[in-house]
Amino acid sequence: MLDKLFQSFPFYLLGAAVGLLVLHLLYYRFNYTDRRREPPGPRPLPLLGNLLQVDPMKLDRNLFELSKRFGPVFTVYFGVKKVVVLAGYHTVKQALINHAEEFGNREVTPIFDDFTKGNGILFTNGDTWKEMRRFALTTLRDFGMGRRLSEEKITEEIHHLIKEFEQYDGKAFNNSRVVNYAFFNIISAIMFEKRFEYKDPVFQAMVARDHNTIQLTGSASILSLTYNLFPWLGPFLKNWRKLMKNVEDNKAEMKHIIKELKKTWNPNTCRCFVDAFLTRQQNLEVSPSTLLWSVVFLLILGLLTKSITSQNKLKEPPGPRPLPLLGNLLQIDLRRPHKSLCELSKKYGSVFTVYFGTRKVVVLAGYKAVKEALVSFPAEFGDRDITPICQDVSQGHGILFANGDSWKEMRRFALSTLRDFGMGKKLSEDKIIEECQHMIKAIQELEGKPFDTAQLVNYAICNIITAVVYGHRFDYSDPYLMDLVKRSSDMIRLSGSASVQLYNTFPWLGRWIKNRELLLKQRDRNVKEVGDSIRRLKESLSPDCCRGLVDCFLVCQKKEEDLCVTNTHYTEDNLISVVTNLFSAGTDTTSSTLRWGLLLMAKYPHIQEKVQEEVRRLIGSRQVVVADRMNLPYTDAVVHEIMRVANVVHLSVPRATSQDVTFRGYFIKKGTTVIPLLTSVLADETEWETPHTFNPGHFLNEHGKFVSREAFIPFAAGRRVCLGEGLARMDVFIFFTSLLQHFRFTPPPGVTEDELDLTPVVGFTRSPSPHQLCAVHQGGF
């Protein structure tokens, strides 16, 4: 309609432009206030801007010519829309590399907004874009982008393309169609795990629609001259209507393909990109619409029933104003709460209050506040805050999520027994060295091929725990070990999920939270498997020769039975919980730290080389032992910096006040949940020179000697300090140093050091994103 009018009657187009120009002059003019401070450029006309000075069909050439006159940074106006143009290699590189964040958003024009609606990757911004891009990059790498797997798909498609070319017998033909088919099929193989025959009518229609869409979005009538400048003209433009139809037809076809893939989808076997997305989507068991309506309902209910009030408000720690019932949930990212809380601390100080729903939480931020609370007020801040999910899992038993006399006795027993079995001493060092040798052998068998570090590291660290708890280790191929590691990892992951955090805030939602049900199923399996192992050990128990922690517990239990102690804490429930606590907490935290260490070495090879040079010079090929730490200052500094940057237990495990306490001038009532924000300690800008950078120099003096730092408390502090700290420190030092003694860790083929992703997976703990590394054997120097 308007397209034909504009093409056939340029006179009318000119008249319309003049009319719009007059109308514009009557209402407003360009504002040139402070123009001298902005990039130069050709003087724009009112309303039309510089449209008469550029040819939309040769826009790149026109802009290049303007850059010769106005320099590498200049301004043009497309209608009333101001556009800054960057020209030349040095300018473009400086903007996109040195100012990546400032120039990082996508310009989403009206036409692109129409057919993306803020979804996807290409024409979106904000959290959606970040998450989708991260997911796409990770998934494409997993499916071989730039590696052997993608090479095979390309090679297969080349054979089909060559065959198609041969059919023309050397005659002239338009190559665009078949070349488009070939490249579309490569994308299809990655997206859907299928290719189409070139003669498939559905396939041909999809390719034709995509090609037509590219042509239409570049047409002068829509992109440059009309629709993007005057979006209200859209329904009158024929090309706009054709474009919208293409978009809807493509969406319908994609939905059909995805629907068919769903029918045969198996979360444990991802065939393609769509399968990976469906698996990720499955973890979000509460749909956005359901969650939205839940929030609206809760808000209305809260407004009708009550508002949050507090006594002595002026004396309590400050904080953002909470909404009724919801509290500050809308101000906190439940997937990365540590970041949200760190930002709030900048505004409200080192002691502040937030509300998770109706639950009041006091947050301690920064080294000085956290240390003062945990060390100077150990009793007042010494109770454990037991959330609904922790109560469901532990039932008040064990060490990690318990209080009172039972907790005191179980912690005393565990500390005493771990010391007896050499925690931090020669006996536990021997177990670690033995396991380290098994791990080195397993990595050597990979012959430098890419591998997922999570599996082997988890098996090795879990075996240290099994040796302490049961008195023996398992082969890495043993189904019991595999299942044990998987259950422990799953429980940590599920307990930190956003939906479980929602359940902790609103416990009555429990029956609708899928992750809670999955977590309780894993708990039940743990109880059964650990119970069976305990019974087997009990049958061969010798009180005079304890093989591990379980034997020691059973001996104590028998003594109390003989003494007819009625209120004993040495019960089967407590034993199962203690064992489960050690596996869940000990395996995940230590293995995540070690995996961060290997990833950081591959990311920063110059630091890896300095560690290996020091080990080569001072240790040689002999086995590394804990005593070597004093003679390896740079290696020791790197290990400490890994633990600082890894920041595995980012929120610490929340505490609760055991009594009313006045802390730093603020009144905190008994039973209040307290979060000692370890992230804010390990990245405290007043304590660390470069808190957000991996810098081993934090632990070295001017002479290159190792120095300890008071703000280094990755295991927390006070009466709830991690009871396995000594064992964990030995694990990380011996494994890390021994592995670098034998291997050089590098990114997999096709991935550069810069492309290695340090984005964490945040749950109950903070672990590296799934990744692969290559371990190149160095022969132990």
Image (spheres, rainbow, N blue to C red):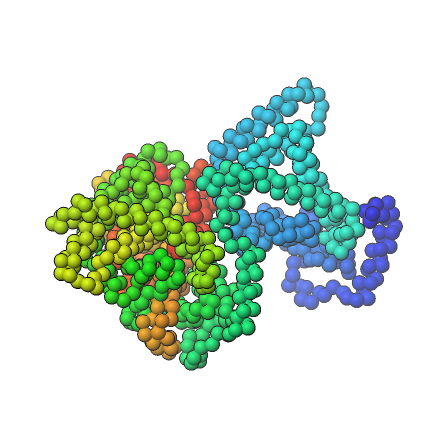
- Which residue extends farthest top? 169
- Quadrant containing the C terminus is top left
Q: Nearer the viewer, residue 249 or 624?
A: 249
Q: Is residue 517 left or right of residue 69?
A: left
Residue sitting at x 19%, y 50%: 551
Measured from the top left, where is residue 153 in percent x and y?
53, 31
Image point (61%, 24%), residue name:
162
Question: For the point 43% across and 39% down, which residue is it?
Answer: 748
**What residue lies at 79% left-to-right and 51% top-to-bottom?**
236
User: Residue 621: horizontal and vertical position, in percent?
Assistant: 24, 39
Q: Is residue 366 visible?
A: no
In the displayed orientation, state which residue is furthest to the left. Answer: 544
Whole-percent x and y of residue 16? 84, 55
Residue 669: quarter of image: bottom left
Work out whether 762 lies above or below 537. Answer: below
Q: Position of residue 292 (x, y in %)?
A: 56, 60
Of residues 418 and 726, the one drawn nearer to the viewer in this rendering: 418
Please count the marks in the image. 0
Q: Is residue 154 above or below residue 764?
A: above
Q: Is residue 581 left or right of residue 95?
A: left
For the question of whether residue 306 can be seen, the reply is yes
